[in-house]
Amino acid sequence: MTPSEKIFKNVWICQLDAGKVKPVFGDLHISDGIIEQLVPKDFKTAFSDKGSTLKDTDQTISDLGGRILTLPLVNFHDHFYSRLAKGLPLSGTQNNFLQILENLWWKLDRFLDEDMIRASVHLSMMESIRQGVTTIFDHHASRGAIRGSLATIFVPSIFVQIASCRLSSSTR
């Protein structure tokens, strides 16, 4: 097997057939980023010694142990810093969208600093990866930390693609 080949064994694949999802259990063979073959297997015998002829001695074989393998998902609208609002005590009226912006989001936005931005990005990425999201479009705003904030958001060590739209402070 070449380095561009990969086998995911003992995996559920959800195939679409005439608009319906058909789950198939088996071993998925990928070569040069293209699915070459799906070898169906019996889920009941897959985890016994009789279930697979593939052994995990090769680095290109990953046993997914019955997990579901999907195509990567895209989040087309996110606000990383919203992760920081979890559990915050709310003040002021929240009866309409403008009041929510004024009494929660714009207040939080004014206090963001580089450390808060970094923490929200890391939390967002961990949550996204766990849910299968690999591409995120973040609508970033941080009035108090505009300079360098996009560099703070870009985290090359985490395999998530980010497209960020920064709002200028003159928009509010």
Image: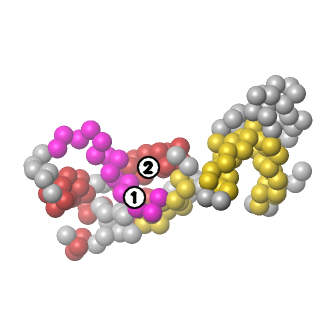
Q: How crowded is mark 1: few (under 14 residues within 10 Å), some or many (20 or more)?
A: some
Instruction: Give coordinates of residue 100: x percent, y percent.
Output: 18, 55
- Residue named by callout 2: 124
> x, y percentage for residue 80?
38, 54
Instruction: Answer left or right for 63 relative to 96.
Output: right
Check residue 97 for magenta coloring. Answer: no
Q: What residue type is labelled 2?
A: Ser
* Residues at marks 1 and 2 touching, judged by CB atoms closer than 8 Å: yes
Q: Residue 32 carries which label?
A: none
**Residue where numbered disc 1 is placed:** 78
Does residue 9 show up? Answer: no
Q: In which quarter of the image is residue 123?
A: top left
Q: Distance between the residues labelled 1 and 2?
A: 9 Å
Please tell me in which quadrant of the rendered image residue 102 appears: bottom left
User: How many numbered callouts?
Assistant: 2
Q: Which residue lies furthest to the left in this view?
A: 92
Name which residue lies at 68% across and 56% down.
Answer: 17
Magenta stretch bounds: 75-90
Q: Which residue is drawn at 82% across and 53% down?
A: 37
Residue 150: give x, y in percent of width and height.
Answer: 42, 64
